[in-house]
Image (cartoon, rainbow, N blue to C red):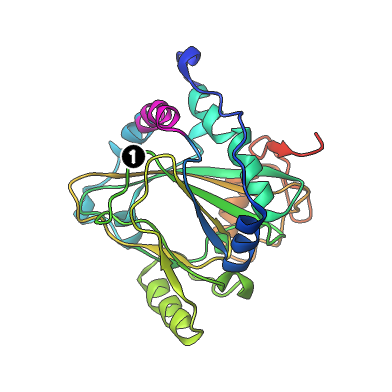
Amino acid sequence: MSTENHSVIPNLQSEYKVTHEQIKAFQEDGHIYLRNVASTEEICTYREVISKSVEEHSKKLAPLEERDTYGKAFVQVMNVWEHSEDVKKFVLAKRFAKVAAELLGVDGVRIYHDQALYKEPGGGHTPWHQDQTYWPIDTDKTITMWMPLADVTEEMGSMSFATGSHKKGYISKLGISDESHQTLGDYITANRFPEITYGAMNAGDATFHYGWTLHSAPGNPSSQTREIMTIIYLADETRVAETDNEARKNDLKQWMPGLKTGDLVDSPLNPLVYHKNK
């Protein structure tokens, strides 16, 4: 890992209060928007160190116009916490993990992986999809935190969610693609799931959604990059599921190294980040 100046990095250990009403709403709708999960000062510091990693990665990418639909959706850097001690403090923060556990209604959560998602000016839309299509984990207790590192304007857009779609579980094996956008868009219409878009968001605000919640995001027509950091959590004591497609085989190898179907998800890449009794 890189050596950095840790003295000025906020520790993110203080609690963020989640109400019973918010927990109930999340579990019913499959998504929620929470304000000021991180302060302006905190997010400003972490934006700098996360963006350094994204900048290094983006040098290797083809020009935007040469990428496919998935590639145009965002610059994607995964498990940033492995490469930076400072980013590690963000990803393993007790504050965020406790919110995730309380929304899920579980005692503790582990990290599945993180992703920095930077949608460049002119970047394309993110098609409708379910995150958990990619994950060989035997639980529906999974949740993603999606946090802007800089303010997201109405023009740039935040994510859209199909309310209640998480209750359907595994809907489709389709990965993020033009086909998934059309097929799952038709599914949302046919099932009359209300679509909710949260619009403009401030840096440090966050949305949380279940792994099965259908969601998408618009393109970025603005001149400013939409800078997002995400963290995926799963309930402690979760086991590895069957790897029934190639994406899940790849995820098992990449995010749960050394594990096999039936094992507890507890590899070195899946640390326990919060437990109310530990």
Q: Would you say residue 169 is visible in this rendering?
A: no
Q: In terms of secondary structure, where does tag 1 sit?
A: loop
Q: Quadrant of residue 24?
A: bottom right
Q: Looking at this rendering, what residue extends furthest in the bottom direction? A: 190
Which residue does the image show at 33% across and 39% down from the upper left? Answer: 150
Q: Is residue 78 left or right of residue 121?
A: right
- Residue 72 lies, in percent from the top left, at 29, 56
Where is residue 32? Give x, y as percent: 52, 57
Task: Tell me residue 41's x, y (percent).
Answer: 41, 27
Residue appearing at x 22%, y 44% in the figure: 224
Toward which corner of the image does residue 272 lie, by quadrant? top right
Whether residue 12 appears in magenta in the rendering, the answer is no
Report the residue marked by disc 1: 150
Up-down relation of residue 241 to residue 53 (above or below): below
The region drawn magenta spans 39-51
Residue located at (63% from left, 41% from top):
97
The quarter of the picture where residue 49 lies is: top left
* Quarter of the rendering occupied by the C terminus: top right
**Residue 128: horizontal and vertical position, in percent?**
42, 68
Q: Given the image, on which type of amino acid does mark 1 rest?
A: Ala
Compared across the picture, whether 37 is left or right of 58 comes to right
Is residue 48 located in the magenta-colored stretch of the structure? yes
Question: In this orientation, which residue lies closer to the viewer: 11 or 132?
Answer: 11
